[in-house]
Amino acid sequence: MSTRDVFLAKIERLNRKVWEGRAGEPTLGSWLANFTGKAGQKEKEQLHALYLLSQFMYFGNRQMRELVRALYRDLFRYPIIEAVRRSNGDTTDVAFIQQRFEEKLGRARFLGVGNPSESGCHLLYYYRQMNSLPKDFFIHGHQIFRGRRRSRKTRLRLPEVDHYVFIDDFCGSGETGEDCANTIVADIKSLNKKVRVDYHSIFGCKHGLDRVRRRGLFDSVEAVVELDESFRCFGRKSRYFISAPRGVTKRDARNLCETYGKSVLPHAPLGFDDCQLLLAFHHNTPDNTLPIFWAGESESPTWHPIFSRYQKLYFSWKPQP
Amino acid sequence: MNAMNPFNLTKANDFSDAQIQEFWVDIPGGGGLLGMLKPTSPMPMLVLGGKGSGKTHLLRYCSFELQKLKAKGALAAQIRQDGFIGVFMRCEGLNANRFSGKGQTDALWNSIFEYYMDLSLADLLLSHVAEIVPSGGSAARSHAAFCAAVVGIFTGGAVPSGIVTIDALVSFLRNLRSSIDVEVNNCAIKKSVSVSILCTRGRLVFGIPELLRVHFPALKNVIVVYLIDELENFSLDQQKYIFTLLRERRGPASFKIGARLYGIKTYSTLSGDEEIKEGSEYERLPLDELLRGNKKYPEFAGKLVAARVANILLSRPGEVDKVASALPAMFGGYPTSRFCSGQVAFVATKYKGRERPYFSKLRKVLAEAGRKPGRGALKGADIDFIIEALRVSDEPLLEKTNVYLLYRAWSERDDLLSAAQQIQADCSAFRGRAKGAYAEVYSHFSGDLLAQLLREAGRGQEYLGLESFIHMSMGMPRNLLIILKHVYNWAVFNGESPFQTGVISVDSQQRGVIQAAEWFLRDAGARASDGAILEEAVRRLAQLFREVRFSDKPTECSLCSFSADLSQISQQAKRFVALAENYSLLIRVVEGQADRNSMRVDGKFQLNSMLAPLWDLPIYRRGAIPLDADLVNAIFDPDSAAQFAARLKNRVAGMKAPFRSVGRVTAGQSELFSKHD
């Protein structure tokens, strides 16, 4: 089998088993046709594109639901149980631990990071469903406060709540998390320093999480899956080229992604914040992923994506006269 | 994405009873699978076959559960009509490996196992009988009498009295089994095992069927067939017990026992270690061998596929025959033509304005041969003359045939210029439908030459169409299903609607076949003891076939077989040849191969066609290459494997230009070119 055939066989299997059938024909063919020889020989370009695709990580609906379960269990529930046990002589009394946990849970509220139309909020539905949580534990950002914001009359609307958890699906550069910290979290803390505020994300780039951590407002900034430097496709520590087959090189792959990336997304040819990720989710593809995978009509009218991204549009809608 | 791949389920063990019935297909015409199994015959039978040959499906199809499905309520009538009660048991279900070790003697374990096996078979049989023979009312008396008689088989004080229903009898047997389970499962902890054996070996197995005839007149012409599957899961001693039951068979009871080819560890019995005799004490049903040799196998296999497509994919179970007849046209391919014009049409476009690869190579080797000292000088004009004579631009496959014939003339030290002219004339006559030597060569070698052409042009070999896939399955239906499973997956990936609209593309078929081949090799290698060594041996054999097939002058056409005098090879080589055969990597050609120089009939083996795509080999067997003991050892004996490269080189030297074969430079070759010197 040729190297191209080996890649295709892997992609077919991934597409069937993991990618929820999103990268089959004609999508794959259209995507491959994007690579026309601008960065070198066409066959070599397509071979590198197929290689990168064969390394792509995709989290489908089922996996996302399981990750949402882990998000609650590992980042919220277990730390509380650990704390309860630690402060009670490492007790193994299950009924006692459960009772204390439920008390803590009753004083916690969960919110999505960002605008209600964004993925952080979208995730809350699954978070509630997969973890069998009551609807009342979920609130909008505006429900945290009472009175005009940042005035002398501003109060916390729910004085019994002592724990807010901001949920996100992905933390790339950390910009969104930092915005959240600067606005809502800072306000909460200014009203009551004792209230605990956490930032929990399913995925997070290490440098993005560190940026939010450095802001110092959240009590805890954690991700279920922390993406370290090795996930940066062309980085020094990249995991993707350690055992690349003959004929595939990091240099050629980078050249390919930069050449075509510049034509579809000139300001971030290797993804937002230069993250260089090979990552997509069932509900969307982060813009930190290499644009050759997700760029679509809004970036370039002729580019065919393989894992489309649904862009956030920042503009004011005005009704047609 | 279409998630309904109708070929996903390929193991009969994973089927529900309804699926066993839905997917059942018998060989058309007389003497089908049921005819071969002969479930009403008291003669015991060993159903032997490779993995996926259909043993389990066949045995389960005869099981009581399927009889019940077919009966649609009239169970007793169905049983009477069938003439047997099929008691199906999978050996794996007994966890038979529990009955060994843990500080106890083999004799003790064997006794417990034999008793447990008898109880299990009796339990299954009585459970079925409880459903067949209505209880209550006037039947109560015969039930009670039957139960009393069965209880009478047991001896010892632990047998309860007052069992008057078959259900109670079944409960009693299950309690006995449970108590044995407890003892066996705790033996390692307790360091002892305490089981009271309450009946003599075999008495339940044969006694209950006899009592059924006595107490239930409706069953007087019915025999009990114990369908025991996966015998390979039993140890040698446990198999010995099964064969003892076969030998001691009596009354209206019989056995049909399924096992893999390598699954039989012994044929001896507990009767003084005597072996059971084929023919008089049991029959052998080599399932895949029979299917392979059956002319109706392609039709049978086609219906097998159609049953899946009609039932699962199209939800039209009544249209199996219609689907079966439409199946061949659902696979894309090339229109039939005399010189495979469709398949080689790419040559004209790919090599437009440049030399075709086989001519480039010929030009190079002729020029190189001409430069050798003592070989005479071959001028460029001579080479041009030769190549022009061989050229048939509109039929690349004829050009390949011409080149092959020129190589052959070269190896026979003919004058190449004259030879080229003669080939040109013969080719022209052949195109005009003349018969003769050229036609014969084309008939024998066109498949190999097409394979060479595809390879030289950097294209994959093409294994296309249902007929090819059926042939590749080599009598093992599961292989066919596995091929189609992968082909289907690729077709979906390629955006096609397999078996629904349009045809399955050549690309999908090609990729699916390769994946199926990889699976087959991996699966066999993983299952076999010394699997890695076996896999390497198979790779070496395939490499030999490939070297011959893609040589300039292959000695055998459609080569995927070899013959050898197995008595001369090393013990290790013998072991690995046998292992390869047992795991169906090699298929023994029953008639063997008569040695060309003696009256000896050598063993003859074909590399399983499932593996052909991995080495671009043919799937249809024609020629067989005779191998000497040294080369067989170099292939199959891991201790001699280091010699393989040298022996292979030596073996194929005479098949490659400039044909300085078998260690000697051909003298006088310069005269080949003398006319134009």
Image (cartoon, coloured by chain):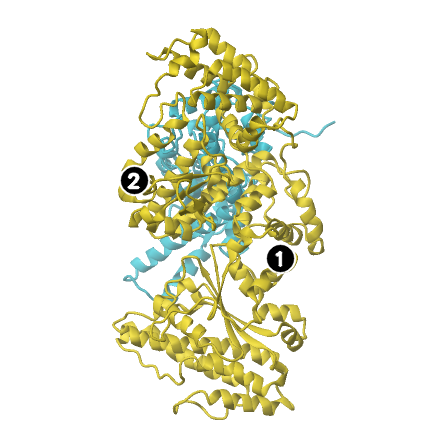
Q: In this orientation, does residue B149 appear?
A: yes
Of residues B67 and A124, the one nearer the viewer is B67
Q: Amino acid at mark 1?
A: Val
- Chain B rendering hue: yellow
Horizontal side of residue A175 vs B235, given as left or right: right
Going from N to C along the chain, the mark reached first, 1 or 2, is: 1
Q: Amino acid at mark 2?
A: Ala
Please tell me whether mark 2 sits on a helix, a strand or a loop: helix
- Using the image, name the chain to which the residue with label 2 belongs: B
Of residues B236 and A212, the one nearer the viewer is B236
Count the marks. 2
- Chain A rendering hue: cyan
Disc 1 crowd, CA 10 A, few/some/many (<14, 14-19, 20+): many
Above or below — where is A320 with respect to B119?
A: above
* Disc 1 from disc 2: Cα separation: 44 Å
- Using the image, name the chain to which the residue with label 1 belongs: B
Residue B579 position within the rendered picture, expressed as x and y whole percent measured from the top left: 37, 51
Residue at 27% of width from left, 76% of height from top? B190
Residue B346 position within the rendered picture, expressed as x and y whole percent measured from the top left: 58, 23
The residue where tag 1 is placed is B25
The residue where tag 2 is placed is B641
Of residues B106 and B277, the one nearer the viewer is B277
Above or below — where is B197 with respect to B646?
A: below
Horizontal side of residue B558 vs B67, given as left or right: left
Please tell me whether mark 1 sits on a helix, a strand or a loop: loop
Horizontal side of residue B362 vs B352, given as left or right: left
